[in-house]
Amino acid sequence: MIFAAYSYLQIAGYEELRAPSAPAEAAPAQAAEAPAQEEIPVIASEAQTEAPAAQPEQGVIAAPEQEAQPTAEPAPTVDPNSPYGKALANAAARGLPEPPALDVTSWEFTLVNGDHSIGQYEPEQLAYLHQTLDETDIQTAYNGNRCPVDIRIAEALIAMGRGCKDAGLPVFLSSGYRSYGDQAANFTRVCQNNGITDGKDGAGHYITMPAGCSEHQLALCCDITDRYYAVKSADIVQSDTVEWLLAHCADYGFVQRFPAGKEDVTGVMNETWHFRYVGLEAARYMTDNHLVLEEFLALYGVE
Ligand SMILES: [Zn+2]
């Protein structure tokens, strides 16, 4: 289309340039009968009209360039002030690859941590995984062994558990959804057991979250281990099950939410067992670039 417009302008310009010379061709024919002396001024005058005609020629040359500019614009433009626009700029500034164009206000990106409480939030619909997993030997616990999670992550979580089982490894889904009340009781118990009041260890990292600040209340996560542990602590060794999950969780849309080395960012101690759903694209990007949810969302301007 640009080419067509360009061609048209070229042709138009060419004809425009040619037009003045047409009389010049005719003139000599007439001039042939007239004295040669008269012919000279005619040619001279044509030369003068020819000179101004060169200006349109420059204009014609410039025109295609002006026409060509709009053709570059159809490339998708991103509002630099939009979350994705910020993510592009922030990722580039940090030397990270181009981040996925995601709507970070979507449910799977809900941020819950010591600084972001969800109050008394309750999931709209829970799925009780024991019902689905009874025919497997994937074990579940908590909440009367029913292992409830937000129904929107159930399919992905079951698939991940089965993938791990298929690899010959034991899977124990120890904790999914906890209500605000459950978390409050959990917080009190863990604090009492550890002789603390703020839920934090000596380094200032949470070992239990205050009610309203736990991802378990969001129900978009699950604690997964190789077997039942009465107490899950940093002392739990890295099992083959956890190693498999680390290597494959992104393929199911999950991330290890509180990895070692990121305690100061998440505010939570290293929890090898805690996996959070964020969707396939975000999980892949976060895992490949070693970003925790706080860092990933910060790219998009979510603090
Ligand atoms: Zn957990």
Image: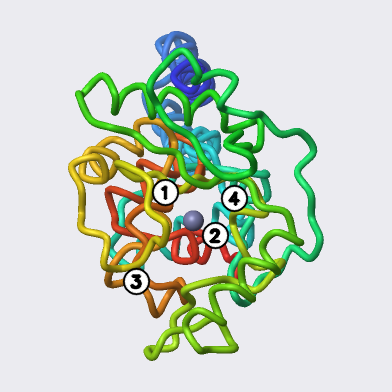
Residue named by callout 4: 109
* Element assignment for label 1: loop
Find residue 252 and report its image quarter: top left
Residue named by callout 3: 262
Residue count near mark 3 (Cα–Cα under 10 Å), binned few <14, some 14–19, many ≥20: some
Residue type of the residue flagged with mark 1 = Pro
Q: Quadrant of the C terminus?
A: bottom right
Which tag, 1 or 2, sits closer to the chain's start? 1
> Of circles 1 and 3, which is in front?
3
In contact (CB < 8 Å): disc 1 and disc 2 = yes
What separation in Å lies between label 1 and label 3 (alpha carbons)? 20 Å
What separation in Å lies between label 3 and label 4 (alpha carbons)? 18 Å
**Looking at the image, can residue 205 be seen?**
yes
Residue named by callout 2: 300
On the rendered structure, is 240 left or right of 144?
left
Residue named by callout 1: 99
> Of circles 4 and 2, which is in front?
4
Find residue 80 and report its image quarter: bottom right
